[in-house]
Amino acid sequence: MKKFLDFITDEMKQAFAAGGYDESYAKVTLSNRPDLCEYQCNGAMAAAKVYKKKPIDIANSVVEKLQDSRCFEEVNAVMPGFINLKISKDFLAEYMNGMKNSEKLGMETVSDPKTVIVDYGGANVAKPLHVGHLRAAVIGEAIKRMGRFMGHHVIGDVHLGDWGLQMGLIIEELKDRKPELPYFDESFSGEYPKEAPFTISELEEIYPAASSKSKVDEAFRERAQEATFKLQSGYAPYRAIWQHIMNVSLKDLKKNYSNLNVEFDLWKGESDAQPYIPGMIQNLIDQGLAYESQGALVVDIAEETDTKELPPCIVRKSDGAALYATSDLATIVEREQDFKPDHYIYVVDKRQELHFTQVFRVAKKAGIVAPDRRMDFVGFGTMNGKDGKPFKTREGGVMRLEHLIADISDAAFRRIMENRTIEEEEAKETAKIVGLAALKYGDLSNQATKDYVFDIDRFTSFEGNTGPYILYTIARINSILKKFEQTCEAANETSILPPATEPEKTLTLALSRFSEVMETSYEELAPHKICAYIYELSNALNHFYHETKIIAEEDRKKQAGYIELVTLTRSVLLTCIDLLGFEAPERM
């Protein structure tokens, strides 16, 4: 099913062509004066320069060709040459019924599906998820779901930090605390224990203790660096400890990501890229791309079109150690071997922009990926407290993500209990759903690159541009449909009728934009556009509800049309919130 805007644009193209003008001028956009019209075309203004005519004359000739169009009920040429368009109510009804009866609400699946890797998550093992991990997980999950809805083969990879100095720090701290463990007995020759010598709680305490110690104890830090080197060189006892760290951490990470309704297809980390590093570096040397600079191995990435100076990418330090760039490039080598992606998407803090510019350029320059391969860096801003600084606990520490989720669920519970429409037990379960929606929508409704203020009171409000308001709208529709089922007689014919009132037409016009919004949001990797759309749609539904007697309507055919319209609205809202990564309770 074609996008609504495509139907309108095709009509305009035919009119421009019939008037003797190039159809490229027939671009149609939403009106910036909704009090005058619903859509507009400004092509006559640009065409005037080429055809040496007055814009209004071109506009008038195009309007003349549109008098019998099935798409428009009113078309006007306005000085100095705008074409104002009002959509036909019959055409709107036809499109609504097409959406209602088609798969994916009328959105066409892409004809050429791509394989897409979305790299998001980025948590470090042995450490709990905290608020700093929220945005990567939430934005990345939405982009993954959006891509799949479009019809692409999208693979989500958590890309864990599991191979750096933190591992050596943990090993040495464990050695200090439990020197009797067999991993530290050089004469031990048996099998290492299957059970980890620590719990997740102990592990999460060991790392910060070791990190603090390394800052004041130089000898301890050197030991940790040596332990890291031995681990990365394949030393069996330390590999066994590392495997314990991974098993315990992954179990906890999977639980916490699941609480956020975030899922990954791949649970790979930096360690998985290590086997690919030697060959990748040798390839850079053989091609003459990598050269020594102050003992380090670097690759120039600057291009003539750059507007600012970009430093070379360091792929090996002077002491022979690998860096994040080395690991990320080797990961691309691995992904090319395993998946041959058509599109890479990295969802990472925007302060990493230079790093990924370097990585992408080296990957293309070295032929690891094709020069035209699409590689997108979705850099996100910071979640701040009301003081404008990065969000902290009241004690000034970094808040664990599970505590943040609990806090916002508690706030949602208090909001629900204020209304006293459901029992306390149901309210507790509903609050978990509403709290997650408040958290995710509060994040995703902001453009990814922008910082935003985490305001628990505003995010959990049932009014305004919030997740709970969207869910409340869905719950309202559920209530209408339940009441209709209990009290009204269904009509034989169930079609959406041409809108008879302004609120009804506003709602249908909002619904008609669904496919366009989905396509644009994914192409621009912009979940906030879906949020803006469902807020507009929710407002339109609530305005229609307040201005229309649905249950009291005596005309059965008209009432059936209303019911089909609100049912379609619910389907669109539920589809959109699923793409954003949350769901709706039956009632609130």
Image: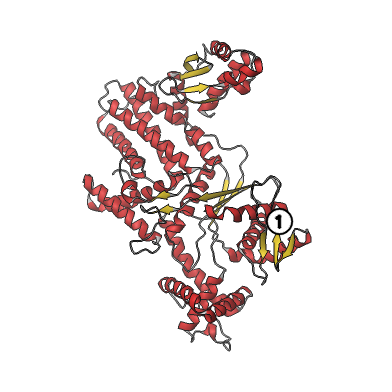
In the displayed orientation, state which residue is furthest to the front.
308
Label 1: how many Cα within 10 Å (few below 14, some 14–19, many 20+): some
Rendering coords of residue 561 (x, y %): 36, 25
Rendering coords of residue 510 (x, y %): 42, 30
From the viewer's perspective, is 273 left or right of 457? right
In the image, what residue occupies the spot 49% across and 36% down?
Answer: 104
Residue 339 visible in image: no
Residue 396 visible in image: yes
In the image, what residue occupies the spot 46% across and 74% down?
Answer: 212
Labels in figure, total: 1
Reading the image, the residue beneath label 1 is 300
Q: Nearer the viewer, residue 245 or 107?
A: 245
Q: Nearer the viewer, residue 529 or 477?
A: 529
Please name the amino acid that badge 1 sits on.
Asp
Rendering coords of residue 103 (x, y %): 49, 35
Q: Nearer the viewer, residue 278 or 485?
A: 278
Q: Is residue 372 above or below residue 237?
A: above
Q: Is residue 490 above or below residue 582?
A: above
Which quadrant holds residue 531? Answer: top left
Q: Quadrant of the C terminus?
A: top left
Q: Is residue 567 above or below residue 295?
A: above
